[in-house]
């Protein structure tokens, strides 16, 4: 039987998906405690900042996974700076996490100022824990360190943060319970609906 190159490639791809794609596919974070943040270096932060979730308790934390070489990340910096400006001096912390070198990050922020802490994840351990497959991606955790939104930065508004803080009468618009429990068959990334105000 003669196999054609395209058929061979498709068969190999099908076998890969059938035998272990769940090992690398993202687990949903929504409704679960945020994974730990262990990074090599933090810039634009107080001396020796505490990135543990107990240390961040009481703050809404906006994690922006980005890369300085990524045009889409750069396009969202101005938007996220506007959102961050609305919460200056409040219990909301923006943390930008990338795998670039400290030198590359320093060069970048000279051209494009970023409002928030800059965390260097050179070994990609945080990216892996959060199952980040594309940048930019935004993860928002509430004051108890529970993930409430996994989305793209262009969908994040001032009202998204206010929703996580429960600033609106009638409560949150996000689901309180996890969309999927770890171990279930559906490994789709949970992107929750934003409050439309």
Image (cartoon, rainbow, N blue to C red):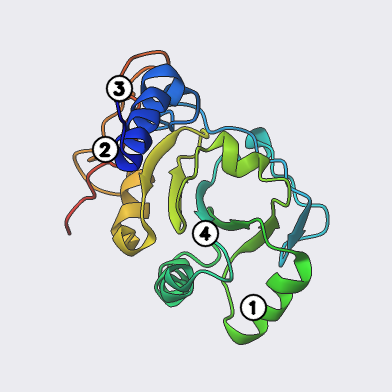
Q: Please, what secondary structure does the residue beneath circle 3 have? A: loop
Q: Earlier in the sequence, mark 2 or mark 3?
A: 2
Nearer mark to the viewer, of 4 and 3: 3
Any mark on residue 9, and which?
none
**What is the number of the mark on residue 108?**
1
| Residue 104 visible somewhere in the drawing | yes
Q: Mark 3 points at which residue?
A: 186
Label 4, residues with CA under 10 Å away: few <14, some 14-19, many ≥20 = few
Q: Is mark 1 on a helix, strand or loop?
A: helix
Q: Which of marks 2 and 3 is in front?
A: 3
Q: Do labels 2 and 3 touch, CB within 8 Å?
A: no
19 with respect to 170 (left or right): right
Which type of secondary structure does the marked residue at label 4 adopt? loop
Q: Which of marks 3 and 1 precedes in the sequence?
A: 1
Instruction: Name the residue carrying label 4.
Output: 90
Label 4, label 3: how far apart the Cα atoms are: 37 Å
* Residue wearing tag 2: 174
Query: In the structure shown, which secondary structural element does the residue marked by tag 2 occupy?
Result: loop
- Badge 1: few (under 14), some or many (20 or more) residues near its Cα, within 10 Å? some
* Residue 157 image position (x, y, % from top left): 32, 62
Q: How far apart are marks 1 and 2 (CA)?
A: 34 Å
Closer-to-camera residue (179/66): 66
Q: Position of residue 129 (x, y in %)?
A: 58, 34
Of the residues tagged 1 and 2, which is closer to the observer? 1
Name the residue located 30 percent from the left edge and 27 percent from the top edge: 176
Q: Is residue 174 above or below residue 137?
A: above
Query: For the point 41% across and 67% down, which residue is it?
Result: 83
Which circle's residue, 4 or 3, is located before the other in the chain?
A: 4
Of mark 4 and mark 2, the one earlier in the sequence is 4
Location of residue 133 in the rendering, given as x and y in whole percent from the top left corner: 47, 46
Q: How far apart are marks 4 and 1 (CA)?
A: 26 Å
Callout in the foreground (4, 2): 2
């Amino acid at each position: 039987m003669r196999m054609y190159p395209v058929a061979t490639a498709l068969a190999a791809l099908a076998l890969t998906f059938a035998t272990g794609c769940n090992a690398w596919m993202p687990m949903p974070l929504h409704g679960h405690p945020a994974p730990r943040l262990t990074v090599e270096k933090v810039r634009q932060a107080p001396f020796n900042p505490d990135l543990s979730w107990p240390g961040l308790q009481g703050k809404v934390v906006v994690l922006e996974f980005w890369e300085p070489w990524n045009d889409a990340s750069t396009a969202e910096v101005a938007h996220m700076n506007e959102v961050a400006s609305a919460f200056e001096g409040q219990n909301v912390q923006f943390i930008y996490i990338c795998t670039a070198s400290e030198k590359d990050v320093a060069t970048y922020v000279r051209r494009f100022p970023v409002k928030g802490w800059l965390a260097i994840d050179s070994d990609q351990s945080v990216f892996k824990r959060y199952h980040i497959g594309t940048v930019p991606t935004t993860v928002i955790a509430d004051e108890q360190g529970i993930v409430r939104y996994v989305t793209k930065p262009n969908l994040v508004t001032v009202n998204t943060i206010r929703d996580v803080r429960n600033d609106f009468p009638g409560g949150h618009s996000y689901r309180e319970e996890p969309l999927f429990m770890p171990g279930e068959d559906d490994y789709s990334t949970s992107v929750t609906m934003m409050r439309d105000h």
